Image: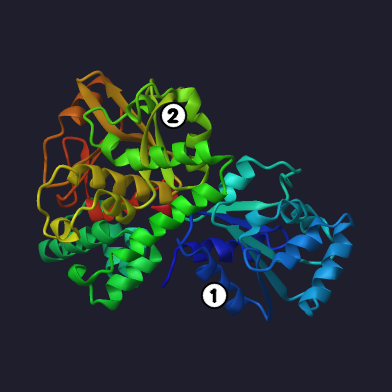
Amino acid sequence: MLRNFWKELEKWKNENEQTPLMVIGARQIGKTYIIDKFCKKNYGDYIYINLMEDKGIIEIFEENINTEDKIKKMELYLNHTIKENTIIFFDEIQKSESLIESLKYFCEADFPYKIICAGSLLGVKLKRFSKSFPVGKVIIKYMYPMTFEEFLMAIGYSDIIEEIRKCFLKNEKMSNPIHEKLLNYYRLFLATGGMPIAVKNIIENNLNVLEFNNDLLASIIDAYFADMKEYTLNYYENIKIEKIYRNIPSQLAKENKKFQISKIEQYARRRDYESSLDWLIASSLVIPCYFVEKFETPLKGFMDEGKFKLYLSDTGLLTELLEIPRNKILLNEDFQYKGVITENYVANELHANNISLYYWAKNQVAEIDFLVDTCDGIIPIEVKANENKKSKSLNYFMENNKVNYGMRISANNFGFVNNIKSVPLYATFCIKKDKENN
């Protein structure tokens, strides 16, 4: 399946090939698949090393010898001489801090080494790195589950993407039959999510949600919990991480969506859960959205780290945790968590475009779901699950703050009325930080 991350790999090859590339992302989002395919297509000689399976490489890099000798031993161990056209892909590199530390040598060596590395919990490892990390000697890129744009490519509907972008930029209505068709595809994506194995399964079942294998997403969640046990400091931290993760859906359903540690269990305190929360964010399993006190650029300068919402990395995992029948989503039925899933989807799409997430609220008067810093200035975004043209909170915010325009993401068609840009849910991927990417 085509992934937009391919462009990041091509950019690295064309501009920074001598500097090792480190790809960070959660388990089973397709990192290994896309990097493996890229290496095979673009290089005459390819070495793939999975440190989860090959402990010998780990042992070699743990030896108390210089890095050049370690590389020679690695060549002997693999029975493979590294040549100028060789690309080396170290998968699950979080298993070896010594190898990560050695990336500095690969970057500075006279020989043109070409190194790509990835890991399912690499973010957690780097957060708790005990050796000397090669700062400035590694290019770090983040990869996420599939976006709706990539879902359209996967199901063979790529031709519509440029039309969506055109309507987004010009605020032109999409032809109604196509608009309704895209909303149906959006709801299907909302139900299954963007984990590649889930997308592959729904395609194999001719987009029939009733034939979708729910066990696939359940197994991913089980694998996440297994990772929590393996990559945490102790048993108690593991328990706290799992409690936070399982608590996210119910907290998003509150009228005040701010995540509260005190709601996890009686007498729970923020300081007791600090490291567990950091672990989840570093693992890319959750996405934080921070409260901002002031409507000014940069938003990060006015965020309150103590007030935040938490979203799951994928809507399919969210619906699986909630045990919501997927046909209810596809049939567009009303149910309590419909708005929660929709908002989580928008958070995923914005996050995949490398947009930092912030929100604003004023007591019980108004709440803006997302504030994003773009080339058009700071844009307030309101998210609606249905065809709702009422924007009480958005109007209140715009009346009391100077903005170029507001944005409402909903099931409505494209448009621009009363200084509010209407964006259909299926077009959220069009929202970018930079004008050149719009």
Residue 65 found in image quarter:
bottom right
Q: Position of residue 193 (x, y in %)?
A: 31, 58
Q: Residue at x 45, y 61 (%)?
A: 29
In the displayed structure image, the side of residue 6 where residue 343 appears, left or right: left
Q: Position of residue 370 (x, y in %)?
A: 32, 36
Q: Residue at x 13, y 61 (%)?
A: 180
Tally the marks: 2
Residue 346 visible in this rendered orientation of the protein = yes
Amino acid type, label 1: Lys
CA gap, disc 2 and disc 1 = 38 Å
Q: Residue at x 28, y 61 (%)?
A: 192
Residue 375 visible in this rendered orientation of the protein = no
Q: Position of residue 387 (x, y in %)?
A: 11, 47
**Going from the N terminus, do you reach mark 2 or mark 1 first?**
1
Whether 419 is drawn above or below 47: the answer is: above
Q: Give the position of the N terminus as an image quadrant.
A: bottom left
Amino acid type, label 2: Leu
Disc sitting over residue 299 in the figure: 2
Q: Residue at x 16, y 50 (%)?
A: 411
**Badge 2 element:** helix
